[in-house]
Image: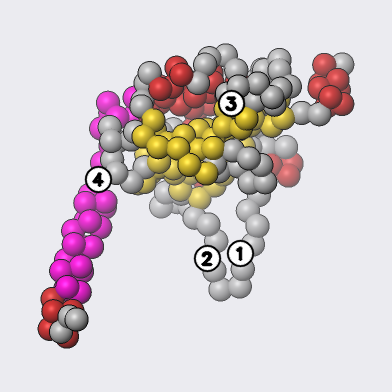
Amino acid sequence: MQTEAEKKVQREAYKVEAQRAQEAYDNFRYTDAQREQTIEFIAAAMRVIRGEAEFDSLKRLLPIVRTGMGRIPGIDNTSHAFDVRFLNVWTGISVSTIPKRDGGHGFEPALFRIDFRPEMNIPRERLEKLLQLEVVHGWSPDGGNLQFEMAPLHGLPYFNGGSFLYSPLKQPQGDFDVEVRFTYLNGPDKDPWTATRLSDIQITRDYLTPEQIKKRND
């Protein structure tokens, strides 16, 4: 059993290590090469989610390091986590897949996500052009891209940022639509429209019913 003196030494060592880790995180800066490689991967992931490229095309850019429980609630899905060592040890890049709906062997991609830790400076306009997204200014209840923010629970602060929702200018011709979400953290002016610090990106398949497909094609 540890003595009190040994426990104190262990606690102090933990504090020093935690402070060192926090300083490394706070002082981290992405390079231009890291940013460009990430943007290249985002473009490749969009092609996969749209059904224009095979899932293996992503593995040729970044290897998969593990699989586990997927991030899509309510359905059977698997998360494929990619190697992010070219960035840092904190960021997560993954694709969640579902079993093939025709009962065949294999899976199909349904959700691509990057959780940036720390945030990466990427202008929204560049991603909008890269992914060919529909841009409508204003609040989303009025038809715009900026998602309405619900009031937080009592005593909790408002989210310091903005989530922007998009559809592609041209949806795929399959039995699903694609939705894109960017989450940005605000700058000093607290204006989400001028924010450049991207903290999260999601590209999702929204599977359609036969009735929805018919309505879309009419």
> Up-down: is 186 above or below 3?
above
Quarter that holds the C terminus? top right
Magenta segment range? 10-37
Packing grade of label 3 (10 A; few <14, some 14-19, many >=20) is some
> How is colour applied across the structure in the image?
secondary structure
Between discs 1 and 3, the one toward the N terminus: 3
Along the horizontal axis of the image, is 27 left or right of 157? Answer: left
Q: Give the image location of residue 190, x and y in percent.
A: 48, 52
Q: What is the number of the mark on residue 152?
A: 1
Between discs 4 and 1, the one toward the N terminus: 4
Packing grade of label 1 (10 A; few <14, some 14-19, many >=20) is few
Residue in the picture at 67% in, 46% down = 74
> Up-down: is 126 above or below 6?
above
Residue in the picture at 46% in, 49% down = 186
Which of 31/84 is in front? 84
Between discs 3 and 2, the one toward the N terminus: 3
Does dot 3 land on a helix, a strand or a loop? Answer: strand
Compute the Cα span from label 3 to label 4: 36 Å
Residue annotated with mark 4: 28
Compute the Cα span from label 3 to label 2: 40 Å
Compute the Cα span from label 4 to label 1: 30 Å
Among the 4 quarters of the image, the one containing residue 28: top left
Packing grade of label 4 (10 A; few <14, some 14-19, many >=20) is few
Between discs 4 and 2, the one toward the N terminus: 4
* Three-letter amino acid code of the residue under disc 3: Phe
Packing grade of label 2 (10 A; few <14, some 14-19, many >=20) is few
Task: State which mark lies toward you, 3 or 2.
Answer: 3
Q: Give the image location of residue 19, x and y in percent.
A: 21, 63
